Image: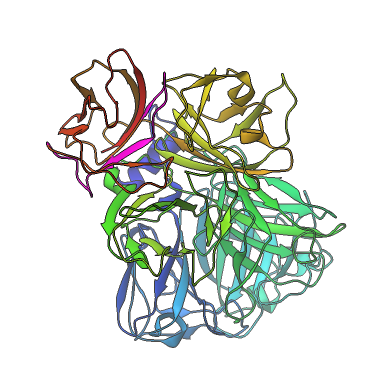
Amino acid sequence: MATKKKLLQAAAGAAGGAGLNVEEVFSTYLYDGTGSAQTITNGIDLDGEGGLVWIKDRDNARNHMLQDSERSTNFLFSDLTNAEVDYTTNAHTFNSNGFTINGSNIQFNQSGSTYASWTFRKAPKFFDVVTYTGDGVAGREIAHNLGTTVGSVIIKCTSGAGSWQVWHREGAGSGTSSSGQLNSTAAFNNALVQYYFGDDTQKIDPTSTVFTVSDHSAVNASGSTYVAYLFAHNDGDGEFGPDADADIIKCGSVSGSSSAQTVDLGFEPQFILYKRADDTAPWRLHDVMRGMPVGNNDAYLEANASSAEADYNIFSPTPTGFRIDYSVPYYNTSGGTYIYIAIRRGPMAVPESATDVFYLEEANNPNKFVTTGFVTDLALQKHTALSSSWYLADRLRGENKWLSTNTTGADLVGTDSTYYTGWDYMNGVDMNIYPSQSNDHIFYMCKRAPNFFDVVAYDGDATASPNSRDIQHNLGVAPEMMWIKCRTASENWAVYHSGIGATKYMNLNGTAAAATSANWWRNTAPTDTVFTIGHQDDVNLNGGTHIAYLFASLAGVSKVGSYTGNGSTQTIDCGFSAGARFILIKRTDSTGDWYVWDTARGIVAGNDPHLSLNTTAAEVTTDDSIDPVSSGFAVNQVSATNINVSSATYIFYAVA
């Protein structure tokens, strides 16, 4: 559906109408400089709708480069006071699905350098770009198209030198607006805000249709030209997502604390611009593409400085916001006031094809870049020819963090030369598992997406029996299968599966049949917003940190299900059209491995290689347990796997 039509439906409140998804209006896109023209395809319609592209060299001390649709080929620099510069030869071309970088300017396309780009599309209730010529009249009202609460306004004189003036709705703390400068570390000054955003005698906060500027030369000198970037603040009034009712941007403040604290946004963020407002502090840009993991170092760039990317362990995303993990001056100190602009994590659109969210590959070289074709959030790897552990990594835990499905072990922390995973790529994962072993390896890769797959990190608190605890998630539907692992202690992998229900649990690292206990799920099935845990250490160790992987059935993409064996052969209908590429099966009424088959190694009419998630064993290639079927797969009863014993019960997960 065209984005304009979707927006009209949302604005009109049409029954069944869909709003814009966050991935249609915002993108963090990482790329390598080439020294020649290259096209960045990020799905944002800049040609038809307009917007802003902000680029920064990650490796070198170079200026931030900002080009918007209203100023043609002219660039500004957030870390400088300079007037705009016309880069006619090297300026970007704005396309219907991204932008083209023309030329080899070292600021945004030097061969050998890596770059981060942030694209903001003009859209009501999200972002707007306004240009105007100053008239020198204090209290001047300038129209904009946000049509909602304005969260922040950033103004720059384009025809001459001058600081970037920033108005933020909570620049002086909760409920109190104030102003500062984007190119400076200086504190916000509530006593001077009227001299930029007011009539010189009083500040005048923006409305849903206009913002007000004074006669100061930084914002309204007669004859000078200006650009203003306006960011919305959604507060339960957002009109985004499939149901046109979701918030995607928040401009808020945090009161500093002497300890860790959690900020509630109502959504999981993918981008945070953050500054201490009441004291000298940099403007820091964080995003999940460069790395904003739970309990690991966060990559940041400073909007007010040309410095290269650095990292610091500070933010941990949650399903409804972010946690500030430490008390430090730039982020969280008692008595401090901190402001942010936060944008929701995507995608919001439900995937329509399994190849958009799931990838598998068998390769001889484990030290490789695995090209999935999509932003990847989970990687599961196993050496197929040798006895070796499974290794599971995910973007939420960050680089060099591994768990093994066949052990109870806590997070394995790797290094660049041994166990390495790099997530800051748009189309895959940089893997380095067994540098000295070049035999076959299998890679399974997933993307987080509504109704398909989600990842949630949480801290255990050993909720006392018989109490229960709800953990929020963003799967969008009730999870039908969950794998949960304590990251900080040797505990079993706990598995919930709808095929055995909420009164039972299983262990991914074991062979045992499903066992009955209320200590895992409190006899409560997950919902589309939460899953419930009890006090068992596997799922809720006091002081431990946990990671949960959530799976669901999605028509034509994935299937979570169960069946009863018939002792011979039977077809398992998953609703697919071209068969299953990945199959996981476990017997539930008796012992049995967590068997895995895939089309990379072969799902054929004859013998099919299989592995077991719960063991280090090399693949077995001598039995015909599975056969291909267009609607899903067929199971055969053979003694090697016993996946179709008469009257036995089984659970499965399959991906098309």
Quick one: 269 or 1, which is closer to the camera?
269
Asked whether residue 7 appears in the rendered view, the answer is: yes
Q: Residue furthest left?
A: 605
Residue at coordinates 52% horizontally, 56% vertically from top-left?
127
Quick one: 331 or 586, which is closer to the camera?
586
Asked whether residue 69 appears in the rendered view, the answer is: no
The residue stretch that appears in magenta:
586-605
Residue at coordinates 69% horizontally, 43% vertically from top-left?
544
Magenta stretch secondary structure, dominant? loop
Would you say 77 lies left or right of 477 here? right
Residue at coordinates 53% horizontally, 48% vertically from top-left?
125
Residue 113 painted magenta: no
Quick one: 282 or 374, which is closer to the camera?
374
Q: How many marks?
A: 0
18 over 60 or under it: above or below: above
353 over 397 or under it: above or below: above
Residue at coordinates 65% horizontally, 48% vertically from top-left?
488
Residue 183 is situated, as x and y percent measured from the top left of the image, at 66, 77
Q: Residue furthest right?
A: 335
Q: Residue furthest top?
A: 647
Residue 330 is situated, as x and y percent measured from the top left of the image, at 76, 66
Q: Quadrant of the C terminus?
A: top left
Would you say 258 lies left or right of 366 here? right
Residue 556 is situated, as x and y percent measured from the top left of the image, at 26, 34
123 over 520 or under it: above or below: below
Q: Quadrant of residue 219?
A: bottom right
Residue 608 is situated, as x and y percent measured from the top left of the image, at 20, 40
Would you say 417 lies left or right of 654 here? right
Q: Quadrant of residue 638?
A: top left
Quick one: 302 or 259, which is closer to the camera?
259
Q: Quadrant of the N terminus?
A: top left
Residue 604 painted magenta: yes
